[in-house]
Image (cartoon, rainbow, N blue to C red):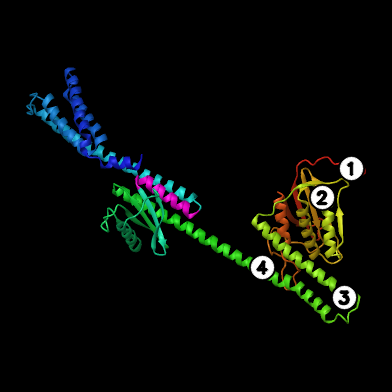
Amino acid sequence: MSPDRFLWRMEVKPLAHVPLTVAAPAAATLLGFAIDRAGLPIANISVAYLMAVLLVARHGGRWPAIAASLSSFIAFNFFFTEPRYTLAISDAQNILTVVFFLVAAVIVSNLTARLRQEMEASRENARRIGNLYEFSSRASASAGLDDVLRAVVDHVAATVRGGSLVLLPADNGLAVAAGCPSRDRLDEVSWSAASWAWRQGKRAGGGTGILPGGDWLFLPMHTDRGGVGVLGVRVEHQTAETMALLDALADQAAVAIERTTLASSVEEARLTAERERLRAALLSSLSHDLRTPLASILGAASALSTLDGALDAGSRRELAAAIEGEALRLNRFVQNLLDMTRLGAGALVPRRDWADLGDIADNARRRFLAIDPVHPIRLDLPPQRLLAWVDAVLLEQALFNLLDNAGKYSPAGTEVRLGAWMDGETAVIAVDDCGCGIPPDQRDAVFDMFHRVGQGDGRTAGTGLGLAICRGIVAAHGGAVTAQGAPEGTGCRFVIRLPQSQAPAVPAEGT
C-alpha cells in the first residue's frame, strides 16, 4: 500500500461512508421482510441487522457503525415489532429484544472498529519497517557520498509524494547537496528555517511553530558524533505517522552519510600514509643508490683531471671504465624509475610477436654478465626452439631484472641458473640463485616497490624497483611471477608463467 493511499484512508471523513451506512441497514430490512414472510422468529431479523452493522464497522469504522446501529434499531422497531409501522412497542419481550439488539450492535461495532484500527496500525508499522529496510539496503549498497545522497532524496520524495532536499554544512553555513526534483530551490524564509534547524537541532519550517511561512519542513540529521546535515521535505499532509517515518528516515540518512564520510577519511588517511611510505622509501633509495655511483664518478673524474700527468695509460683506462660502469648503473636506476612510472600510468603496452625464448634468455644473460661477471649463468633450455607470443624487449628486461636480483643476493662465484620450458599452453621461465632465500611470509611482498628482505645498514645496493617492474611487465602479458624456495633447498627460485596460444610450426635447425 502506498503512503498516500494509507494517509487518505486514515484521514477520510465519515461522510464518505454515508452510502454504505444507509445501504447496509436497508438491505437488512429487505432481508427481514423475506424472513418475516417465511414465518421465522423475529430474532433472525435482528441477526440480519447485526450483520449489516458488522459490515459497516469493517469498512467505515466506529461512527458509521454506531449510525448504522441506530438506523437498524429504528428500522427493526418500525417494521417488525408490534404495533408495526410505529415506533411504539407493545410487547415487553420485544422491548427487551430491541434494547439488547441495540446494545449488542453498539458493542460489536466498537470492537470491530477497534480491530480495524489495530489492523491498520499493524499494516502501517509493517509498511514503515519495510520502507526503512528498503532505504537502509539502498544506502548501504551506495559506495560514495553522491550515491548515498541520491538514494536519500529519491527515497524520501517517493515516500511522501513530494520534494526532498539534503543540505550539508559548507563554508558559509549550509549548501544544497542533492534534491529531488533537482530543480527545487529554497526561498529566503526556507533558508532561514533550514539554518535554524541546523543550529538548534530541532524541526523548523512548514507545519511547525518555527518560521512556518515556507513550503519546506526541515529535520536535522544527527548521530552520536554530532550534526550531519538537514533533511528538507515538502509534503502536503503532515500526520503523526508521516512525521514519525520522516524522523526515522532522517536518522537512517544521517548514519549513511556519516558512514561514507568516515570511509572517505579512512581511505584518505591510508593513501596519505602510503604516499608517505613511498616518499620515504624513494628518498632512502635516492640517498643510497644515487649518491654512491655519483661519488665514484666524481672521484674518478677528479683523479683524471688533477692527476692526469701522473697517471699511466692503464690507470686512466681503469678510471674511465669506473666512470662508465657507474654511469651505466645510474642509467639503470633512472630507467627503472621511468619504467615504474609508465607501469603506474598504464602506458606500458606490450608489442607482441612470436619470439624465441632461448634468444631472449641469452640476451638477458649477456647483459647481466656485462655488469656482473662474477656470477656465471647456466642456461637450461630444451633442444627445440621455444616460441612465445610476447614483447621480446620487455620480457628481456624482466629476465634481466631477475638475474640482477639473483646476482645481488648470491655469494660471488656462485652459479645462477636460467631455464625455460613449455607446460601445456603456458610458457614457464625460472631463475634460481644460491642466496640466503626469502622467508615464506615475504615472498609476495618482495614484488612491492622499494621492498627489500632484511634491510639494514649494510643492505645490498639497489632501488627496490626491479622485481616490481618485472611483475608489471609479466602482468601486462597476462601472466604471473612468483617467488619460491629453490629446488635444492638453498637460495630462491623466481618463476614466470605466460599463457600462450598455439605457436606456428617452425622448421628444425639445419633443414
Give how far apart the Cα atoms at labels 2 and 1 are: 15 Å
| Residue that label 4 marks | 281
Frontmost residue, 197 versus 51 = 197
- Main secondary structure found in the magenta portion: helix
Q: Which residue lies furthest to the top in this view?
A: 38
Q: Can residue 440 be seen in this view?
A: no
Element type at marker 4?
helix
The first of marks 1 and 3 along the sequence is: 3
Q: Name the residue under label 1.
A: 508
Residue type beneath disc 2: Leu
Label number found at residue 316: 3
Q: Is residue 504 left or right of residue 284?
A: right
Along the polypeptide, which appears first: circle 3 or circle 4?
4
Helix, strand or loop for disc 3: helix
Mark 2 residue crowding within 10 angstroms, few (<14) / some (14–19) / many (20+)? many
Q: Tell me: 232 left or right of 460.
A: left
Report helix, strand or loop for mark 1: loop
The answer for how far apart the CA atoms under marks 3 and 4 are is 36 Å
Q: Position of residue 223 (x, y in %)?
A: 41, 59
Where does the image place residue 76, in percent across and percent down from the top left? 14, 27
Dot 2 or dot 1, earlier in sequence: 2
Q: Vertical placement of 444 versus 290: above or below?
A: above
Judge left or right: residue 37 versus residue 260: left
Marks 4/1: CA–CA distance = 50 Å
Q: Which residue occupies the foreground of this view, 124 or 405?
A: 405
